[in-house]
Every structure is written in C-alpha cells, then in structure tokens.
Amino acid sequence: MIRFKNGLVMDMKESCAPEKKEVWTDGDRIIFVGVPTDEQLKSAVFEREIDLNGGLLMPSFKNAHTHSAMTFLRSYADDLPLQSWLFDQVFPMEAKLKGEDIYWFTKLAILEYLSSGMTASFDMYFELDDYFKANVESGFRTVMCGAVSGSADNAKRLEENYLKFNGADPLVSFRLGFHAEYTAERGLLEAVADLARKYKAPVCTHISETRSEVQGCIDKYGMTPPALFSSLGIFDYGGTGFHCVHFSDEDIELFKAHGVSAVTCPASNAKLASGIAPLTKFIDRGVTLGVGTDGAASNNCLDMFREMFLMTALQKIKLEDASALPADKVLTAATKGSALAMGLPDCDCIAEGKQADLVVLDLDKPNMRPFNNIPKNIVYSGSKQNVKLTMCAGRVLYEDGKYFIGEDVSRIYARCEELAEALKH
Amino acid sequence: MIRFKNGLVMDMKESCAPEKKEVWTDGDRIIFVGVPTDEQLKSAVFEREIDLNGGLLMPSFKNAHTHSAMTFLRSYADDLPLQSWLFDQVFPMEAKLKGEDIYWFTKLAILEYLSSGMTASFDMYFELDDYFKANVESGFRTVMCGAVSGSADNAKRLEENYLKFNGADPLVSFRLGFHAEYTAERGLLEAVADLARKYKAPVCTHISETRSEVQGCIDKYGMTPPALFSSLGIFDYGGTGFHCVHFSDEDIELFKAHGVSAVTCPASNAKLASGIAPLTKFIDRGVTLGVGTDGAASNNCLDMFREMFLMTALQKIKLEDASALPADKVLTAATKGSALAMGLPDCDCIAEGKQADLVVLDLDKPNMRPFNNIPKNIVYSGSKQNVKLTMCAGRVLYEDGKYFIGEDVSRIYARCEELAEALKH
C-alpha cells in the first residue's frame, strides 16, 4: 500500500474543491480516501508513505487525442496550412517509418506526457505491435484507436487489431476507428459501420477539423461528416470525434443523440489555423467533452496545462465573453471528460475502487501563490513546473523530474535523434 | 569572470541559429563571445565555469508590460469582462494596498519571472519606494513606468518620480507614463505632453486595449487614442504603447511615424476577451514589437513561454493562416523587441560589451527533442521546465529551481499569503 498524506485532495467526483484528506492505494487501485482513524492507521502496512508537504493530489490528466510517435516531426515542418502540411510533409515522412522508429518515438512522447501529469493516451497510429510494446514496457496506459483509411479491404485489419489488442494487457484497450472521411472510401465507412454493429462497439475518427474538410464532405455526400457517419450507422454504439472544430448545432445534436464524445485539440487547431471549436455548446448540450494534445508535429508540445489554458482563452476570444468556459469545466474535461471519451470510466476521479491514476502538483511554486483559488490557479497559471509526481495504475512513473519507466532517458533521447536524422535521408 | 562552456549559443544579434560557442561575463557585462584560443584560456581567471552540458545560452526574456504586485489578485476575480473586472474588483482591492504589500507581492512576481527566464520588467504601479526596494534587493532589472491618472495636478508627482528614480540604481530606470486615456483628464494628457517636451522623453501608456475604450475616445475626442496622443504631442519623443489590440492601419502609421513601440499581451487580451492584436501588421510596418505578461490578475501566470506560443497561435487563428508570425519573429520580440521597447538597448542580444542578461535552457527534456529546429522547439514547445539558469546583470538569480535573490522563498510565500488574506477583510 502507498499512502499520500499531509496535503490537499481534489477528487473531481463532483466538484473541484480541494480538501485535507489522505489517499491510499494498493496495487493498481485506490483503496481509501478520507481522514483515517488511529485504528485504521495502526492496522495499515504501507510500503511507502508520500508526504505531500501541502501539495495537491488530483486525478491525472488523460490525453484524449494524440499520435504519440509523431514526436519525430516536432518543429520539422511548421508554419504550413493543414492540407499541405499533412499531404506534402507528414504523410511522406510517415511512409518511411518502421516499427523500431515507432517504438522509440512513442517512448519519447510518454516521457513528455508524464512530465505534464498525463497517465493515458488515446492514440491513433500504426505499427501497433511496437507501439503496444512501448506503452506496456513503460507502465503507461493507452487506448489504441484504429486508423484505417482507403478501401473497404482495410476493415479486415481493423477487426484483427480489435480482437488482438483488447484484453492483451490490463493497461491497453483498442477501439474501432478510421482516419477521417477525406481519407476513406465510402466502402470502408460502410465496413466500419458493419464492425460497429457486429461488436456493438463505439467508433472513433478525426471529424470536421477544417472548414475545407466539411465542405468537401458536403460536396461529395450532401451532408456534414457527423450527418454522414450517423446515416451510415457508424455511431450506432456511440464513439468519439477528434477535433470537432466546424460543428453546426445540428452536428452537435447528432453527437448528443448517439452518445458520441467530442475531443478538442485547441493548440493544434490554433497552430494549423483550423479554427476554434464551439466548446461551450458541446458542454451546454450535455455532450461529453475531452481534450487532447494531438501529435507533436502540430502542437508542438504535449502539455495538458497549455491545452487547458487554451480551451478557455480561445472560447473567451471566440465568444467575446471573458466569463466563457470557467476553470472547473476545463478541469473536468481534462480529467473525467477525457477518461469517459476514452472508455476509461475507472480512471475518471479519485474514489475508492477506482484506478490509481494520479498526479501530485507542487503548490510551492510562485505561479501557484497566493491560494485565492487553487483550481483556477491550475487552469490559468499551472505549468509542467508544478508536476511533482505522476502515478499510473498505482505505479510512480515520474517524480521530481526523474522517470521510472524501465528505460534510461538519455538512451531514449539518443535513439530518437539518430532515428529522426536517418528518416530525413 | 564567469565562463559558459560546452553548449550552444543563440546570440539573437541577427539570427536565431544556435552555434557552438562560449560566453564569458565579467561584472555585469558580456566580455567574450566565440571559440577561445588556448592562449585566451590560459590567461583567463574564472571565478566559476558553468558547464552547459549541451544546453542553450540565449538572451534572457524581457517582460515589456506588467504590474508585478498584482500577484495578490491571481485567480481572485476571473471570468469577468474587463471594465467590471477593473472597476468593481481590481481598483477597490488596489485602493487598500500599502507599501509593505507592494514589496512582498513584487518579490513573488520576481520569483516567477526568473523561473521563466525573464530578467527585466516594464512595470506600471504605485508605492514606488517599496517597489524599487523589492527589485534592487533582488538584483532584478526594472523599468518603472509612470502610471498617473485623473487631473493635471498629478503630473507633478510624475515629474518628481522621473527625477528621483532615474539614476537611483544601475538596475533601475523610470519612464514617463500615464495609466490610460479613459482614466486621464485632458489636462493631465496635456501636462504629460509638456513633460515629454521638457525632458525630450518617451511616454508610455495602456492604449486601445478594448473596443469600448477606442469607441469611448472617439466619442469624446473624435479620434482614436493613438491619434489623440499624437495630436497632443505626447509621442513627440517616442514612447511605448501597451496592449495595442484595436489598432487601425492609420494608428499603426502614427506609431511608425513617432517611433513608438508596441507591446502585446496576448494571454491577458485573450483571458479578458479583449481581442487579438494585429501583430504581423506592426512587424511588417517596421514598428518595434515587444511582449509582456500583463499583471497576474489578468493572465494569470507570468510565463514568457505561454506568451510566445500565444503570439503566433492567435495570429494564425486571426489571419486563418498557419504560416503567420513564424518562430524567429516571436523570439525576436521576446528578447530584442521587448528590450528596445523598454529603453534597454544594452540588454537586447549576446555580444561583447552588452549587459549579461542571459538564460540557459535545458535541452535534455522531452519537449525539446529531437533537434529538428531548436528556435521552433523553444517557441512552440518550450516551458518553464526548460529554464535551467537565469542571470541578470552578471549575477545568477535562479538555477536548478533555486533562487538567489537574498530572501528565503518560503518567507515570501508565507508573507504573501498573510497579506493577501488580510486585504480581503
């Protein structure tokens, strides 16, 4: 058992109010939340007692949309419009990737996630065996997301992976998914809908990220991507849409009706000039809202604090309303909302029986003082500097700047430099 | 003498290209930049040799607009429109401030500046003796900025402070300034113009931060704030405008014609829903552009990495152009542009004879890897986590998370909590 003591706990069950409590974990679970009695303390045997020193324990952040291995393209091709960035720069480089590349670049991303208090990724990529290995070896939780594109034939591979990776490790699950409407033939979309019905499973995809994507879909099918996918039955068992920038009120209604979650990627959408998603409308309509960093090629950092500030700052700008999207709703999206969008209802908050996916924030940094309002300090002023400890499934993977993922950090840096350089030639 | 060795130097003289070089400082100056000969090394006597371990030495960031002591209002009154935030929340709380408050809240801000690689603030506030003391004691550079408002009588106090603080300490200078058009009577504006002419001095002010401010000025005077101030002669010897959000092309021409610098505060402007300043237009027209955090009440953090990402991300959104405001222009604004807007031409870049205002960035963090493009990594992916050392005027004030400002950090936190709490009652 591990005991967290002498600090504040923000459990995010129903509110963001920090309280003086303890949290105990055993194995991968939270087994106690509260103020222990002397008797409880006497009978407990702890393998470690972690003194929070007045710091804050809260549910870890979950990265509900990313492409981890894209770290190799960080700062490689910035300052381009999305379509030419994707088709002229990203896709040709990705075509060269081998399993070993994916393995090391994913480990680099995991380091960054942990340093920003994240313990899980909703990750859409390929070379899945190597990707799987990188996560499991590191003790990092991941929801692998199908990323098929092209013709209907590719649905076979999606089904194989769905069966192969679900249940393969307690830290891993796999969700049906395809890259996007604009990279999929109609036959593939129909085949994915068949799989959704066959397995009664939710489906995930990039959706309505750019205005031109939406217009292209309307030109081709006479409807928006959410309407098209709904009409094909892709969302018959729910799902998750990534980006959701150019959404009409009718699109939002479709998400609500089918129980589809929306995941926003504000930094990526800003950097690629895609636009600002209507987050307050999703929340007001009761659609589950999560948040993700997207890949390092389009962000370029993997930092939940940046995403949280941008979520609210961009809504304020878009709506010309300084009261739009207050801090508690942002924190909810980055913890509970992301967990639900990823199909991880056991990782959403701090409560007995839940997974021990936790982060300790150091409040003894100037950006956290004074304590006028701790949740607002986190959203409006927090940074990676405040992350003291990150625990995933009961294991401390990051503490005081050091990583405990079974691999030497300098080796990860060195291998990534070598492999990234080799890919340029 | 202090020697920085075994790393990269980005001097920002003309480009952002990092080079393998050394930098030596002596007293408050840089005395050598380059690859030393064996002979030079033999005859040099160093009091300290700092091994950069492959890290990056660059000019420190300068915070070209802030109200340091407003740290006490961090997260105190978020999510309100600017006018009610300012008049109903901020001004009543500020009216209670005493010298001791200013002293401690300013020290708290200095901690945060240093942790984000900043070595100078362009600071507009009151209780100047205490403010002066907090900076000088800490070894932190500041340009104090007049903040008078109300009637013409207050110009006397402005002149007294101008004469009192200029020359009072090598780390301090004082610039003529007033709060804003909407808090100044016409008589005060004319009196400030008289002082500008009397001392042949530049003048600084908040300007065109919100649409309603610009409209109010047009309603009252028949012209925009830049046109009004120009017509009164306030900018006859140049100056600096803070915020500059709602600027017409004609306003930008006036800044260019009078040699007035523009300082942008993107996080504050977003959080208060004020808007997005036309940064690319200022740059294209050749107006000096700096960047500031604004006070902690409206940001809420004091972090140059956040400001740099927002500068470019918000331009990309505003112009719907992912190539808008590339990284090198952002870095130039945060170092050289800010220094020039503050009247600190000796602090703008790394060159022999310049002030030793420097920052060391740790590139052995996951967000800086791989090294596809280091300047882009800094702007798009950098964070406080990367700040290893901050040097102001040749003195190391921050290193590896520790502060060397002649005051115990925990005492600053404790005093600020007490004083902030007391102000609420």
Image (tube, coloured by chain):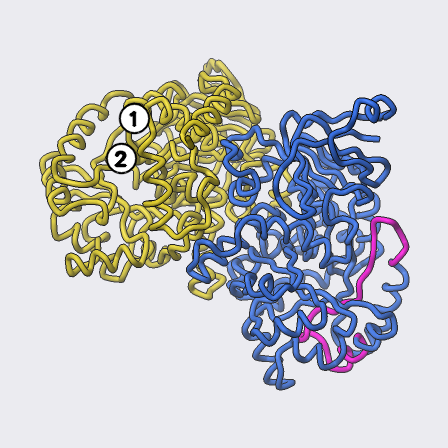
Chain colours: A yellow, B blue
Q: Quadrant of residue A107?
A: top left
Does B363 sit above or below residue A151?
A: above
Mark 1 belongs to which amino acid?
A: Val
Judge left or right: residue A226 versus residue A68.
Answer: left
Chain for mark 2?
A
Q: How many marks?
A: 2
Residue B306, position as x, y percentages in the image: 56, 48
Whole-number angstrom distance, CA of label 1 to CA of label 2 = 11 Å
Q: Secondary structure at mark 2?
A: strand
Q: Nearer the viewer, residue A178 or A79?
A: A79
Mark 2 belongs to which amino acid?
A: Cys
Residue A34, position as x, y percentages in the image: 46, 31
Residue B382, position as x, y percentages in the image: 55, 40
Magenta stretch, residue numbers: B166-192
Q: Can residue B29 be seen from the camera position used here?
A: yes
Residue A12, position as x, y percentages in the image: 42, 40
Does B233 sit above or below residue A376?
A: below
Estimate how packed mark 2 is, as few (under 14), some (14 to 19) or many (20 or more) residues with alpha carbons within 10 Å: many
What residue lies at 50% left-to-right and 40% top-to-bottom? A18
Task: Read off the residue under disc 2.
Answer: A145
Task: Read off the residue under disc 1.
Answer: A172
What residue lies at 56% left-to-right and 26% top-to-bottom? A401
Q: Secondary structure at mark 1?
A: strand
Q: Nearer the viewer, residue A87 or B335?
A: A87
Q: Which mark is residue B21?
A: none
Q: Nearer the viewer, residue A131 or B259?
A: B259
Estimate how packed mark 1 is, as few (under 14), some (14 to 19) or many (20 or more) residues with alpha carbons within 10 Å: some
